[in-house]
Image: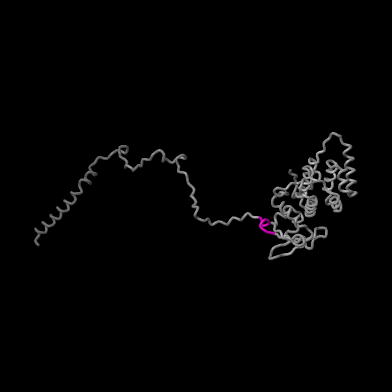
Amino acid sequence: MDFAQMRTGRKRRHEVASSSEDTLAPTSSTTATSPSLAPSERKRPKSKVSITSPSSLDTPESRPIKKEPVENPTETKSTKPKPEITNPLYDDIVFLRVGAPRTRFGIHRGLLTKHSTLFSTLLSPHPRTPLSPTLPHISITHESDTLTLHLADQNPTVFARVHQWLYSGKFLSQGEEWKAIPWPHLISVYLFATEYGISRLHNKVIDGSIQKVLTGGLFPSQGTMTALYRLDDKVTPLRKVLVKLFAEKCDLRSAIASNGSYPTRFLNGLVVEMYDMQKREAEEDVDVWGTRKGWYVFGEENPICVD
């Protein structure tokens, strides 16, 4: 290659380079030739601004309320199981075999322990065995892992009345009237309630005895009063109620003529009561029903008398 050809090739490469620079010249030349602006006249680059509604502004009133997660009722929580609210005393059944031959009664342990001070002692986690000689004769056994109390000296008919009262709170059955209840039955229930510490039932018999006389029932016979005064002093409140009823409401001449002689202790009490009556004003109407609470008994399980 001679010197002329080399020169021609170099010139062509220079022209190609110049043409490539010319394609970029408008931008670079514009930037280079544009006059410099003052700082206040320079345009700041535009930033993208999002236009939001006033309701979306971050104010306490417009901030979204944080909602608690909604529980799914089908999901089971992994929490401890809630304890069952139960009273084992009212779940357990105690059997009582009463009288001879033995009549079997089933009753909830809680009813016995709630109303009776004696049963509450017997049915405690550690019952006293043998029982005190002053307590009614009761033996305790287990039949098929069930506690059984044997009340051999009690009348099944009397305990059936107690059983009814414990569950219903009512002494009389449907259709019964106080005046039709025999005195021996009333006295037997009263004696059971006294021996076993069932104060509410004791008071119920006091009410029933007065209601029996006031509703036209007969007075106790000579034999009934004799049996009543042969009992111990546990029946003293009932004796006093009957003495007062005899003095206030009974035709003594007719009663003595029909029934013969009454017990001496009863007659002595009757004389004292009638003497006290003479000391009162003649026109005063004695309210036996209103004064019945003077013969009530009260205990821890029966602190308040309710009519």
Asked if the magenta segment contains residue 294, the reply would be: no
Instruction: Please report the bounds of the magenta region as a residue range.
Output: 87-93
Foreground residue among 259 and 167: 259
- The picture places residue 131, in percent across and down from the top left corner, at 79, 61
Vertical arrangement, residue 139 with respect to residue 18, above or below: below
Can residue 126 be seen in the rendering of this structure?
no
**Image point (85%, 43%), residue name:** 246
**Image point (77%, 60%), residue name:** 99
Can residue 286 be seen in the rendering of this structure?
yes
Q: Quadrant of the C terminus?
A: top right
Q: Quadrant of residue 255?
A: top right
Vertical arrangement, residue 97 with respect to residue 224, above or below: below
- The picture places residue 12, in percent across and down from the top left corner, at 13, 55
Q: Residue furthest bottom?
A: 144
Foreground residue among 17 and 51: 51
Q: Quadrant of residue 305?
A: top right
Residue 307 appears left or right of 10: right
- The picture places residue 221, in percent across and down from the top left corner, at 84, 49
Q: Quadrant of residue 89?
A: bottom right
- The picture places residue 113, in percent across and down from the top left corner, at 72, 55
Visual colour scheme: one colour
Residue 75 appears left or right of 34: right
